[in-house]
Amino acid sequence: MAIPAFDFEYLRQLVRQQSGVVLEPHKDYLAALHLDQIAANAGFASIAELVEHLKHTPLSELHLQALEALVIKETSFFRDRSPFEALKASVLPALIQSRSSQRTINIWCAACSTGQEPYSIAMLIREAFPELSAWTIRLIATDFSKQVLDRAQQGQYTDLEISRGLAPELRDRYFRKAGDAWQIVDEIRQRVEFRQLNLIHSWSALPKMDIIFLRNVLIYFDIDTKRSILNKVQHYLQADGCLFLGSGETTFHLDPRFEAIQSKTSFYHRLRSA
Ligand SMILES: C[S@@+](CC[C@H](N)C(=O)[O-])C[C@H]1O[C@@H](n2cnc3c(N)ncnc32)[C@H](O)[C@@H]1O
């Protein structure tokens, strides 16, 4: 079902105002694909009727459902591998040394989608750094979408999701078959603290972080929003903390206070020392 241009423009504005995400102008066919079911479930005969209703009513659960359906939520376990290799080979070993008196490390996945990213970090820590079980490791995972957070918190994945990025040994160790799905074991699930947080709003409820994963989300924002988010990152990242972005993302030309650090297989960002 096609979406008339003026309806798609309304949806683009809704998404941009509420999440900062800029939908590409020619992706109206994708919007049609995602909104069809929402329109039908809410009792509308077409997407045009749904949009007409959204336009003339105050922000509601239905607006949020439409918005969440239109934002890209693509993710996978150990996505791109190299950031996780850098965590294991250099970033966590260095933090373990520098935090040996406090014995506390704060890690934040800032747009965690359905949870594969924070659970990958939790599995990596459990596998490679068993000594950290005696430390306080806060692994906070946030997203603005309640829909993805509910799924993440549940920790159930399809065969396809499990087959993307997860080594069979880790699957066998940390997942149990639950009907057609794979359920992550409580030991890993309970290590992650999921919270709803919109990156374009206040972050005041967060502690300072030693590691921030802000991956594959900046790419959807305009330049001013990217700058404003990086500015906030600068306040929430410890002076010696590490920022991981997606493989197609950079702070270059956006915020000179960050420098890129090349590790063997990956690169991440740090705040330049004053
Ligand atoms: C493409 S996924 C990336 C997931 C994961 N970080 C990864 O790299 O695999 C982008 C996520 O960003 C979330 N998102 C988009 N805009 C957001 C905002 N303003 N605040 C918080 N999360 C947002 C979406 O809901 C989605 O789950």
Image (tube, helix red, strand yellow):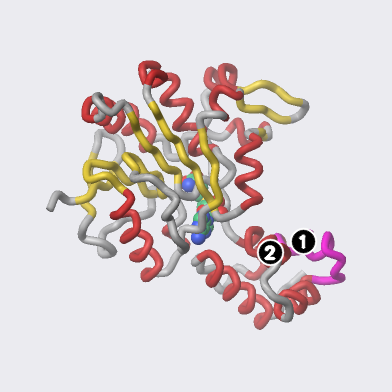
The crowd level at tag 1 (other Cα within 10 Å; few <14, some 14-19, many 20+) is some
Above or below 251: residue 116: above
| Mark 2–mark 1 CB contact (< 8 Å) | yes
Tell me if 119 is positioned left or right of 53 in this view.
left
Magenta residues (range): 34-46
Dot 2: element: helix
Q: How far apart are marks 2 and 1 (CA)?
A: 7 Å
Q: Magenta region's main secondary structure?
A: helix
Q: Name the residue under label 2.
A: 66
Front one among 192 and 260: 192
Is residue 66 rendered to the left or right of residue 173?
Answer: right
Q: Residue 92 occupies which quadrant of the picture? A: top left
In x, y percent, where is residue 239?
Answer: 22, 45
Residue 194 to residue 187: above or below: below
**Residue at 59% over, 43% down:** 114
Front one among 200 and 66: 200
Amino acid, disc 1: Ile
